[in-house]
Amino acid sequence: MSRVFLISSNTTTDPYPVYPLGMAVVAGALKSAGHQVQQYDWLAQGESLPPLLQEIETFAPDLLSISLRNIDNVDSFSGEDGWYLRRVKDFISELRKNIKLPIVIGGPALTIMPEEIAEYLAVDHAIIGEGECSLPQLAASLEAGEAVPQIIGRTEPLPGDSFSAPLFDPHLVDYYLQQSGMVNLQTKRGCPYRCSYCSYPHLEGNRFRARNPQLVVDELEQLKNEHGVERVFFTDSVFNDPQGEYLKLCEEILRRDLNIQWSAFFRPQGFGREELALMKRAGLYALELGTDAAADQTLAGIDKQLCFDEILTVNEACLEERLPAAHFVMFGGPDEDENSLNEGLQNMSQLGASVVFAFSGIRIHPGAPLHQRAIADGIVNAETSLLKPIYYFSPKIDRQMMEERIEASFAKQKNRIFPPSEGMKRMQVMKDFGFSGLMWDKLIRFPK
Ligand code: B12
């Protein structure tokens, strides 16, 4: 059996430090397959090379696994600072100067553009998609001296109950609890929606694959009892599946009297006060809503398959249940024009006490339908590299005018955030006051 040293290469703290769950999950899978593992988190354990090399030398691994979470920060206002791959490349070339080990890379960022990233980072192997089966398999093949290609394709999507349990490292859990007051867990994979800009169906497949609620609650219980975790974020692409698996999970949490707080991403459609009340009893304390666009015209432009009235209904239910909600909204997407901008800003003002995070332009990810639209609109051509982010901006509106209007409309409101750097500034202020976690939930003042 092999010895695998795992590294999480993510060091961004935007919007807050996020537990390296992908690494923990593949570490769990390797361990179950009989391999020995050690995890190293570049953010928690520091960016200096000597201690890392020391740990690698002591562990004496056969294989080095690097998890790649983000390519960039999907914010059109950021320049080079918001592009993370250069640092990873430099890091890998420094490692190469010191150690002679095969390097394999995986994770969501890699899966978005595997060939281009594998070539740019000059790694030995890159595994697309879920790592639970492929990574232990690679370790075994290399140990047996078998030839393995550089790019390894995806395996069949795992059924929900076969996802590996994350191997939480107690030191890392302590670090993240201290930094952001929470760790994370996945209750299902997949997304059946077709929002034209989004990479989720490509990353996780286009049908929901839910884990057995008992398994999830076992893990939550373990996090609470063994690691003192009181808050988690469920990392599901969409938490509220129309089949209602999410409600079964809440019922199981209640049945086991778990008393843990959690938050998740929701599609703002198909649930109301009844569901919210159940979730709140089960520990839901804040909702991140994938509202995505502000007006019916731009919602249709990204094929969101919902309309603003539905968003408003969900928002009102959240306010009535006194649950903090944040809407993530991108302006400037397909079919944005002056009319939809005006309507969108008017719509945002109807969201009351809830928070709105607005973005300008939409990051084009290869393979997403927006990519084709961007080609048709002359923003990129089929050969343009998307390794460094390129943003879709509707040709029907002037970018500068649009951004000025958003800023003016949001001015002097604590719970309306634009440009995205404004959010980071407010988070920093709150951090300085000793807050941690999502933090945006503290911006909400419910009407009396
Ligand atoms: C949940 C989530 C968030 C939450 C995280 C909350 C929390 N407390 O955990 C929030 C909202 C905070 C967030 C923030 C951001 N996110 Co985010 N996020 C996600 C999401 C939906 C899930 C990630 C996750 O945890 N998955 C669960 C774990 C278990 O899966 P995994 O990491 O993919 O690991 C599996 C495989 O990838 C693989 N694997 C992992 N490592 C390895 C290693 C090897 C060697 C191998 C072989 C395989 C392998 O095996 C694992 C098990 O199957 C993804 C989209 C998605 N559906 O994947 C985006 C995603 C990763 N995020 C993205 C981005 C950009 C960001 C931000 C930079 C945006 C921002 N400015 O706010 C920040 C960065 C946060 C940070 N500090 O890192 C992008 C990255 C794409 C890109 N262009 O870079 C994604 C892909 C979404 C998108 N827009 O397309 N995010």
Image (cartoon, rainbow, N blue to C red):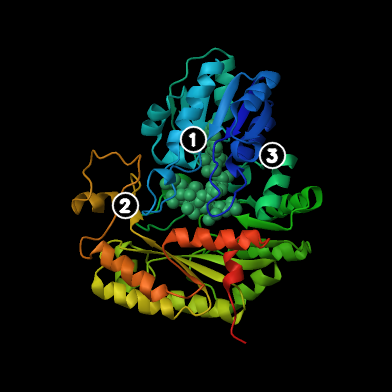
The reply to whether callout 1 and callout 2 are in contact (CB within 8 Å) is no
What amino acid is at disc 2? Answer: Tyr
For residue 233, which numbered disc appears in the image?
none
Instruction: Report helix, strand or loop for mark 2.
Output: strand
Badge 2: few (under 14), some or many (20 or more) residues near its Cα, within 10 Å?
many
Q: Nearer the viewer, mark 2 or mark 3?
A: 2
Badge 3: few (under 14), some or many (20 or more) residues near its Cα, within 10 Å?
some
Instruction: Report helix, strand or loop for mark 3.
Output: loop
Q: Which residue is mark 1?
A: 155
Percent position (x, y) of residue 71? 44, 42
What amino acid is at disc 1? Answer: Thr
Circle nearer the N terminus (1, 3): 1
What amino acid is at disc 3? Answer: Leu
Q: Nearer the viewer, residue 230 or 361?
A: 361
Locate residue 163 relative to residue 408 in the image: left or right. right
Residue at the spot 30% in from the left edge and 61% down from the top edge = 333
Percent position (x, y) of residue 80? 39, 43
User: In which quarter of the view is residue 3 placed?
Assistant: top right
Percent position (x, y) of residue 276? 61, 73
Q: Which residue is mark 2?
A: 391
Asked whether residue 288 is in view, the answer is yes
Asked whether residue 215 is in view, the answer is no
Residue at the spot 68% in from the left edge and 29% down from the top edge = 38
Residue at the extreme right = 225
Q: Nearer the viewer, mark 1 or mark 2?
A: 2
Q: Nearer the viewer, residue 61 or 1?
A: 61
Circle nearer the N terminus (1, 2): 1
User: In which quarter of the view is residue 143 placed?
Assistant: top right
For residue 167, which numbered disc appears in the image?
3
